[in-house]
Image (cartoon, rainbow, N blue to C red):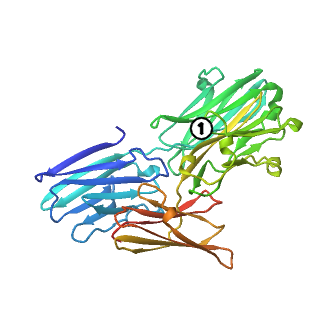
Amino acid sequence: SSTCFVVLLLKLADGFTVTVHADPEVPLIGQGLMLSCHLIGKIPTNFQVHWYKWERNKNMTLYFYNSTSNGSELVRAWDEHRSITPKGWYENGIVKVRLFPVQAEDRGQYVCAVTGDNVYQEAIAEVIIAGFGSTPRLIIEQQQNNSTTLRCTSHGWYPLPEVLWTDSTGQNISTMAETRIQKSVTELYEIDSTLRVADIASDIISCTVINPLLKKHRENVIAISVRVQHRVKSLNVEAEHETITAVIGENIILPCRLITKHVPPSMELQWRKEDDKCPMGYLSPNGSNSREWLRKEYEKKAEVFKGKEFGKGNISLKLNNIQVEDTGKYICSATSNIFHREIIIEVVFGGVGNETSLQVHQQKICGYECKWTGWYPKPRFSWRNHKGESLNSLADTKEMQEENNHFTVASSIAVPCDTPEVTCAIVNTESTDGHLDVIAFPGW
């Protein structure tokens, strides 16, 4: 198992034990992590629960609960560079702490210690973090003296990744490569690998980066052709962002740009979903023989940029009225008889924003209100419950544009008070950065 649990009992209480659980077991960088401490059996009358991260020099407190004072958060000692401090709460014998967003430095041992009625018990969770990095960027860096030098770069990996080079036959040619892997300031690994191969009439080379912990990989391929080397060298497909955050019912644009000075003959531009063998549609911009095709089920859902935008190299895909089933990975590719380029764009739900204000009105039905000011352009908002499910259909949202063109957005929602967690978030539609607004828990 990827998560190790150790229970230490210093003084036993009849029928009382403590266990811990981490969800997910191996969180990805940027995701959330929920740590749960379960008090099982005969719970002491007066007790305290201390969640902390074990460190050699100084333990870092996440949350402290006292049954006589209804809990308190002691997070002043937490990492000062973290924009969002851990959130903790106690409910029905379970003490939970949520970390968001997870960083590489969050790996390690987390202890839940329970004291009360002369009893002490603790349980330890070993948290392992993983980073599933970016799709490799693979380019022809140099062609001379009957040889071609390829360069493969990627970032955002943890733990130490593996780099694999293969040719069109699937043969491993990694021993021919010079690979440098180093840590960034965020403790994530960056890859820079070069491969020099002898010129041949035509060949396809693949660069793959593998996460050994997740047993998952990202790959990119490139075609080498002596006859068109001066053109292939400057041809690629790129995207400004590899992850797009979506809100149910909204429209989104999956970015993809064709970088080339010359349009090769018989080129085909294609969009498809990774788990779908058939393409959503394609565009073949070959002069008088230009063709365009879109699958019938996507006629109202999707449209590819054309006309002036295509003249600028913009082959982005617009998806309308996003639904849950639209999440996943989409592949933008450019192909001809002499090359193939592709890039993967992932669509996910959710978003985070700057913390502003939150008011809670607790009855049998709890009301929550979030208000954001100073945003431009007009942002998107999102309400979610503790399972990550959208609550937008229950929300009442008002938007107002100020004289300085900035937007103020106020949104309110009413949900059952036994909902463990309600999150309101806001997303800047023209930025990859999001900021978690507020997480509310019953009892505030």
**Residue 418 versus residue 107 in the image, above or below:** below
Residue that lies at the very extreme toward the left in this rendered image: 14
Q: Residue at x 48, y 49 (%)?
A: 29
Quarter of the picture containing the N terminus is top left
Residue that lies at the very extreme toward the right in this rendered image: 288
Residue 226: percent from the left, percent from the top? 80, 25
Which corner quadrant of the image does residue 265 belong to?
Answer: top right
Answer left or right for 275 relative to 314. left
Give the residue at mark 1. 274
Q: Residue at x 33, y 67 (%)?
A: 73
Helix, strand or loop under label 1: loop
Q: Is residue 54 visible?
A: no
Quarter of the picture containing the C terminus is bottom left
Q: How many discs appear? A: 1
Residue 115: percent from the left, percent from the top? 19, 60
> Residue 209 or 399: which is nearer the viewer?
399
- Mark 1: few, some, or many residues within 10 Å (few <14, many ≥20)? some
> Residue 331 or 139: which is nearer the viewer?
331
Answer left or right for 274 relative to 57. right
> Residue 38 or 380: which is nearer the viewer?
380
Residue 392: percent from the left, percent from the top? 51, 62
Residue 280: percent from the left, percent from the top? 67, 40
* Type of amino acid under label 1: Glu
Q: Residue at x 24, y 56 (%)?
A: 113
Q: Is residue 190 visible?
A: yes
Residue that lies at the very extreme toward the bottom in this rendered image: 403
